Image: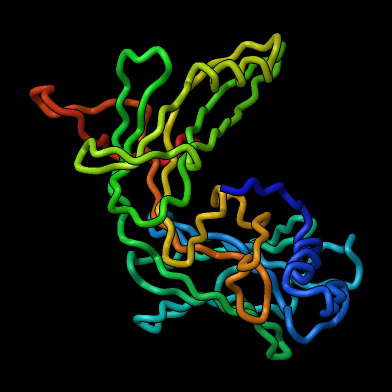
């Protein structure tokens, strides 16, 4: 699988994408254009109660904060026709606006996001939420190298697999909450165990060493650990390393946005504890109940 290096500015993404599709085309992203009206990034996740989408707009000055005036972002359930106007979060990064909605999403439904300006120009992206993700199995045994996680191989697209450490760091008098994540999606292999599954060995000693060395001299308390697992819809591209990298993914098919740029994916995710659950008679390993985010 290819290694993708982050590009932190969506304006640079516009330029890079045009270089991919042809050097004979010209585009000035900070001026008015008739082809790319918005960039759209994010996921629609059936397991989350709030959906967040990031919107980028062309600007005259790259140092200007994007302005949401005159922009409407709509989320539509294609099957039912239900629509919701996504709310502007009233805070923006240097390059992107953030929109949200609490409309419930349904597995195996198709959704359309429309970002539209008051002059009628718009960008559209359509995604499908996958089937519900079967809860993965965590198997902690006496293996000194680490422990295993198994994901049912009925999942067509595994979009993400991360370990998450919730850590309290105490450097001198200050106490800081921090979450460390480690990505294992690209390390998955297939096995016939548990009726067919994708699995990987999680080297927790290496993760703990990284956290310790990153905070030399500080007292570290690990408060909780979880796995984050996500299934992707049919628009998922397996060259993407993680759903966290949607803004940085560049390839010949880097955008699924009509009249715009960016990547949006339908997902179904679960957070499962760092724990092995068993049947009442301890004869078999079974999935644990999913959890809410610790923080």
Q: Nearer the viewer, residue 15 or 247?
A: 15
- Left or right of 224, for residue 279: left
* 54 versus 31 height, above or below: above
Which quadrant would residue 29 be assigned to in this image? bottom right
278 or 98, nearer to the observer: 278
- Give how far across and how far down residue 149 sits, in percent: 35, 33
Residue at horizontal 55 percent and vertical 65 percent from the top:
264
Quarter-wise, where is residue 278 in the image? top left
Instruction: Give the farthest residue toward the left.
Output: 281
Percent of width and height locating residue 166:
52, 28
The residue located at (47%, 46%) in the rendering is 160
Question: Residue, x 30% and y 48% (percent of image)?
Answer: 153
Q: Residue at x 74, y 67 (%)?
A: 20
Percent coordinates x, y for residue 33 in the rendering: 81, 83
Furthest residue to the bottom?
Answer: 120
Is residue 255 rendered to the left or right of residue 192?
right
């Amino acid at each position: 699988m290819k290694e993708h290096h982050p590009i932190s500015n969506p304006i640079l993404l516009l330029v890079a994408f045009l270089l991919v599709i042809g050097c004979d085309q010209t585009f000035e992203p900070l001026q008015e254009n008739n082809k790319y009206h918005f960039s759209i990034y994010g996921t629609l996740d059936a397991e989350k109660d709030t959906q967040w989408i990031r919107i980028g707009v062309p600007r005259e000055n790259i140092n200007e904060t994007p302005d949401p005036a005159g922009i409407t972002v709509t989320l539509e359930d294609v099957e039912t026709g239900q629509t919701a106007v996504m709310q502007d979060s009233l805070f923006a990064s240097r390059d992107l606006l953030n929109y949200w909605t609490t409309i419930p999403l349904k597995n195996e439904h198709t959704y359309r996001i429309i970002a539209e300006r008051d002059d009628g120009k718009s960008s559209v992206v359509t995604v499908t939420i996958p089937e519900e993700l079967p809860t993965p199995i965590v198997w902690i045994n006496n293996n000194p190298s680490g422990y295993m996680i198994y994901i049912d191989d009925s999942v067509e697209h595994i979009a993400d697999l991360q370990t998450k450490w919730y850590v309290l760091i105490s450097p001198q008098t200050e106490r800081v909450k921090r979450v460390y994540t480690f990505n294992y999606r690209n390390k998955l292999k297939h096995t016939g165990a548990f009726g067919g599954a994708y699995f990987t060995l999680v080297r927790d000693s290496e993760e703990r060493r990284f956290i310790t060395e990153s905070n030399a001299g500080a007292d570290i308390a690990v408060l909780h650990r979880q796995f984050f697992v996500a299934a992707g819809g049919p628009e998922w591209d397996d060259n993407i390393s993680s759903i966290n990298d949607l803004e940085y993914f560049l390839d010949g098919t880097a955008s699924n946005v009509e009249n715009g740029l960016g990547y949006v994916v339908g997902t179904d995710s679960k957070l499962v504890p760092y724990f092995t659950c068993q049947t009442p008679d301890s004869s078999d390993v079974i999935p644990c109940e999913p959890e809410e985010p610790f923080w």
